[in-house]
């Protein structure tokens, strides 16, 4: 019986030796070094980024000239320097008010300090920038689109179209609509 135990121990030792050697052979070198793991990064103004494809090219970006800034949080309870920036931008009134600011470093630094209080939307001009004559016909939407309503054309063509409309016998003018509504009121069924 003693021999069986010894032989059993020897078999057990032989069985554990490969497991011990496999666990000892795995080594950890600490934190991974990004210089050696990510070798093909591209540097852009001090920032290294890693594109998915090696031949990837970013599309050209045209920064917006103007920003539409709207306050989305209340002024109350904020420090005095944030209130001062909101007052300088003209956003200390109603929460639905907005202002338009230039995209320059000074304004960007201000907006960065109050970024948690405002919503910044870049202003785009899908139909071209307005001129001095178009200022009265310019609309700024909430999504940042600045629309310019163009000139409707010469006055002569508009007057001729109005004349043709007035001469139509089946047009719905105010008097016809009033008579029809009165008849429907008097005889509803």
Image (cartoon, rainbow, N blue to C red):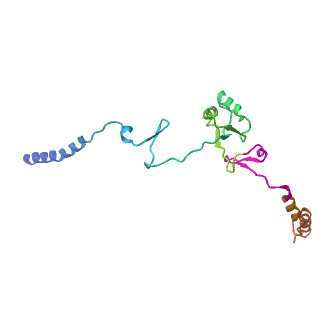
Q: Place residue 102 in its image quadrant.
A: top right
Q: Residue at x 17, y 48 (%)?
A: 15
Q: Residue lying farthest bottom? A: 189
Residue 143, image x, y percentages: 67, 48
Screen quadrant of the C terminus:
bottom right
Residue 27 located within the stretch drawn in magenta:
no
Depth order, front residue of 70/165: 165
Q: Residue at x 57, y 45 (%)?
A: 61
Residue 135 located within the stretch drawn in magenta:
yes
Depth order, front residue of 130/79: 130
171 left or right of 57?
A: right
Q: Place residue 83 in its image quadrant.
A: top right
Residue 130, image x, y percentages: 73, 45
Q: Residue at x 47, y 49 (%)?
A: 56
79 left or right of 54?
A: right
Q: Residue lying farthest top? A: 80
Q: Residue at x 90, y 62 (%)?
A: 174
Residue 79, image x, y percentages: 64, 28
- Reply above or below: 124 against 152: above
- Reply above or below: 155 against 110: below
- Reply above or below: 142 against 108: below
45 left or right of 163?
A: left
The magenta stretch is: 130-156
Residue 41, image x, y percentages: 42, 42
């Amino acid at each position: 019986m003693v021999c069986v135990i010894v032989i059993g121990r020897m078999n057990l030792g032989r069985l554990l030796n490969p497991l011990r050697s496999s666990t000892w052979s795995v080594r950890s070198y600490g934190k991974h070094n990004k210089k050696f793991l990510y070798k093909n990064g591209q540097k852009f103004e001090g920032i290294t980024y890693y594109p998915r494809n090696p031949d990837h090219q970013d599309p050209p970006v045209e920064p917006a000239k103007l920003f539409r800034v709207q306050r989305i949080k209340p002024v109350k309870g904020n420090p005095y320097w944030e209130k001062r920036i909101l007052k300088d931008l003209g956003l200390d009134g109603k929460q639905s008010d907005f202002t338009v600011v230039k995209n320059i470093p000074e304004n960007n630094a201000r907006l960065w300090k109050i970024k948690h209080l405002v919503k910044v939307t870049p202003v785009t001009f899908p139909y071209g920038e307005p001129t001095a004559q178009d200022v009265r016909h310019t609309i700024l939407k909430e999504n940042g689109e600045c629309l310019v309503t163009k000139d409707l054309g010469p006055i002569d063509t508009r007057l001729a179209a109005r004349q043709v409309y007035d001469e139509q016998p089946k047009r719905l003018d105010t008097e016809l609509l009033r008579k029809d509504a009165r008849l429907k009121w008097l005889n509803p069924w």
